[in-house]
Image (cartoon, rainbow, N blue to C red):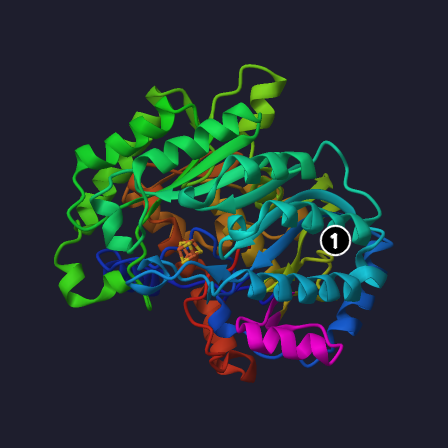
């Protein structure tokens, strides 16, 4: 009989049945997923203002380290839609007028948060989307001014990232970003090969990628490149060629992840599927990529993230990715006594707020996401309301699972720390899971941690689903679990 104070866990038969069913199924790419998936979210019964007042009360006992996310809705139209593979909410770019209107609404939302966020300490800022480098040069200063007005000031030493696509970076924009205070650029390259990128419908050329990177170097901006592997017709040689180009170009950080086949991805269509590498092919690519990256002088930070090995404080700054790193270890503690919690505060279209306020079983934590339709987002702001769509109020087990999901992204769960902060023996709770993974050589356990190894790293999204499976059965059985219609929408970072 399992201890009701522990996270509900699958038994041996359930673990075996799950693994034999899922091992050769295409995984939904959970590069940015947390627990629980948005398909379990629903409109929250508490008004946002009440949640924020409650959060303010928690902040009197616990220091919050805030990672601010600012959302942008627009993307250039592609055929297939949304670059074929992208599951993030977005709206078609129809010209600068729509952008200007959106910025006015964004400013309104910033102002709504002023009574609640003004005293927070900022740890990092991420401008994501959508395609934030669709903005014109004069917009970057305005965006930073909104942040400045909300928080009083922006610490000069924090990481401030803006993401975009290669064909939209230009010298006037990069200069304006630098002048406005941005210090990191994340470039959604996805594919260097001009032929393979056509599968995404993008009109992207190799020289645009190189120009973007050269501009980042010229203006001293830390830079990161997103690359996808597992494209139709992509060979091992193609994939390694992409990594070679990125490392040769002096990129500081690389996110290398598998093509998304789930949900509305164009690549889930039968005609496309026939051209895809098989799952064993993708595992082989994943392992070969890891070997290549290590030999190229990079260190693995998460299942998907690689940073150039730092040689000094400056290269350490350039190759870090604090926005994500801060959330992988969102509880700072002293022998189990919590002294700081990292949170995500999201403002803008489809932005997520993840507020793990406390680790006490009696306290409330939650996650919620802004509207994913621009019309709904603007309509709510017109009514003076927070433009929140759906969310999820955590039970204590969900906080534990959220922490475990984040740890697993780093390929290591510190079971000693878990016991200190949650007073639960993780090795015992999930013993049938660890036994099954160990038998397949997917993990190694020592006195401090569970380490995911080899193909076990590739399968981490599957293991996340496995350890959450019994808790999600409970959620599905309750009213909370009724489908929210948000299936397959990824949530940034958490
Ligand atoms: S991949 Fe980037 S550019 Fe393409 S639809 Fe998604 S957010 Fe937009």
Q: Is residue 44 visible?
A: no
Nearest the eye: 363 or 449: 363
Q: Position of residue 90 (x, y in %)?
A: 47, 64
Is residue 370 highlighted in magenta? yes
For disc 1, the neighbor class at 10 Å (few under 14, some 14 to 19, many from 20) is: some
Q: Is residue 308 visible?
A: yes
Q: Position of residue 5 (x, y in %)?
A: 61, 64
Q: Quadrant of residue 371?
A: bottom right
Give the side of residue 395 with respect to residue 429, left or right.
right
Nearest the eye: 331 or 295: 295
Query: The C terminus is located in which quarter?
Result: bottom right
Is 231 above or below relative to 476? above
Q: Which residues are magenta?
A: 367-392
Q: Residue at x 30, y 51 (%)?
A: 259
Is 10 above or below relative to 454? below
**Residue on which disc 1 sits:** 146
Q: Is mark 1 within 8 Å of ligand 1?
A: no
Q: Position of residue 428 (x, y in %)?
A: 49, 52
Give the side of residue 357 with respect to residue 89, left or right.
right
Is 342 above or below relative to 33? above
Q: Position of residue 116 (x, y in %)?
A: 82, 61
Nearest the eye: 443 or 241: 241
Q: Residue at x 20, y 44 (%)?
A: 195
């Amino acid at each position: 009989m399992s201890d009701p104070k522990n996270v509900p866990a699958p038994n041996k038969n359930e673990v075996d049945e799950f693994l034999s069913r899922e091992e050769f199924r295409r995984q939904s790419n959970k590069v940015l997923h947390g627990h629980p998936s948005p398909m379990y979210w629903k409109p929250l019964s508490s008004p946002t203002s009440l949640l924020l007042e409650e959060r303010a009360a928690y902040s009197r006992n616990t220091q919050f380290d805030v990672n601010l996310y600012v959302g942008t809705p627009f993307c250039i139209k592609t055929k297939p839609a949304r670059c074929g593979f992208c599951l993030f909410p977005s709206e078609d770019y129809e010209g600068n007028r729509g952008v200007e209107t959106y910025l006015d609404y964004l400013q309104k939302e910033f102002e709504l948060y002023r009574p609640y966020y003004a005293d927070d300490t900022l740890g990092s800022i991420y401008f994501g989307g959508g395609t934030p480098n669709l903005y014109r040069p004069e917009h970057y200063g305005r965006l930073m001014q909104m942040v400045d007005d909300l928080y009083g000031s922006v610490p000069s030493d924090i990481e401030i990232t803006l993401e975009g696509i290669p064909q939209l970076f230009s010298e006037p924009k990069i200069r304006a970003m630098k002048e406005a205070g941005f210090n990191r650029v994340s470039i959604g390259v996805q594919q260097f090969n001009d032929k393979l990128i056509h599968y995404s419908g993008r009109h992207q050329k190799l020289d645009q990628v190189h120009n973007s990177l050269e501009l980042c170097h010229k203006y001293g901006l830390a830079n990161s490149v997103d690359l996808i592997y597992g494209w139709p017709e992509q060979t091992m040689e193609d994939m390694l060629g992409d990594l070679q180009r990125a490392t040769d170009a002096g990129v500081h950080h690389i996110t290398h992840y598998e093509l998304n086949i789930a949900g509305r991805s164009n690549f889930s269509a039968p005609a496309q599927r026939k051209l895809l590498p098989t799952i064993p092919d993708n595992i082989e690519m994943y392992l070969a990529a890891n070997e290549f990256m290590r030999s190229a002088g990079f260190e693995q930070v998460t299942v998907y993230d690689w940073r150039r090995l730092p040689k000094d404080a400056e290269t350490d700054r350039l190759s870090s990715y604090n926005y994500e790193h801060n959330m992988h270890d969102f509880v700072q503690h002293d022998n189990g006594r919590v002294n700081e919690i990292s949170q995500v505060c999201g403002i803008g279209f489809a932005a997520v707020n993840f507020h793990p306020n406390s680790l006490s079983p009696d306290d409330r934590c939650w996650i919620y996401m802004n509207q994913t339709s621009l019309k709904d987002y603007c309509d709510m702001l017109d009514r003076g309301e927070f433009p929140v769509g759906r969310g999820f109020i955590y039970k204590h087990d969900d906080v534990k699972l959220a922490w475990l999901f984040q740890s697993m992204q780093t390929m290591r769960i510190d079971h000693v720390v878990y016991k200190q902060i949650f007073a639960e023996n993780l090795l015992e709770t999930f013993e049938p899971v660890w036994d099954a993974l160990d038998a397949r050589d997917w993990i190694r356990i020592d006195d401090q941690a569970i380490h995911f190894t080899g193909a076990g790293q590739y399968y981490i999204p599957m293991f996340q689903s496995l350890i959450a499976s019994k808790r999600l059965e409970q959620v599905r059985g309750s009213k909370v679990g009724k489908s929210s219609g948000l299936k397959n929408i990824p949530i940034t970072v958490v």
